[in-house]
Amino acid sequence: QVQLVESGGGLVQPGGSLRLSCTASGFTFSSYAMRWYRQAPGKERELVAGIARGGGITNYADSVKGRFTISRDNAKNTVYLQMNSLKPEDTAVYYCNARMVVVGGEYEYWGQGTQVTVSS
């Protein structure tokens, strides 16, 4: 059974930090690129950060560059999102995504999401 379980969300004041974790099971984690998405109320889901299978390549949305860091530990089947200097506009539900492209298609899995609220 494939599972992606996010944790680490919560309420934090502007300027604060949070670290999200996403632990995978039921598939070969190291074969999948991993991404964090977020969705704020009334807005479309947007890509926040991504990391390649081996962890050597990362990419970020312009809105979080320099503040967020994505990393992964393939031995622990876990991907992280370190979020610093948080702003109210970072408030959203954050989702973990796993994706592997194969000949003829792709495999993709989503977590259930974790709420991040940035407010004073």
Image (spheres, helix red, strand yellow):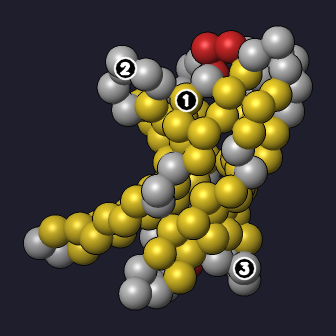
Closer to us: 1 or 100: 1
Task: Compare marks 2 and 3 and give the one earlier in the sequence.
Answer: 2
Identify the secondary structure beneath mark 2. loop
Quarter of the view holding residue 68: top right
Mark 1 or 3, closer to the camera: 1
- The residues bearing labels 1 and 2 have C-alpha atoms spaced at a distance of 9 Å
Name, please, the residue furthest toward the left.
Answer: 104
Task: Compare marks 1 and 3 and give the one earlier in the sequence.
Answer: 3
The amino acid marked with disc number 1 is: Ala
Mark 2: few/some/many CA within 10 Å (<14, 14-19, 20+): few
Q: Position of residue 42 (x, y in %)?
A: 36, 18
Query: Position of 41 compared to 11: left or right?
Result: left
Q: Is residue 36 visible?
A: no
- The residues bearing labels 1 and 3 have C-alpha atoms spaced at a distance of 26 Å
Identify the secondary structure beneath mark 3. loop
* Circle 1/circle 2 CB separation < 8 Å: yes
* Circle 1/circle 3 CB separation < 8 Å: no
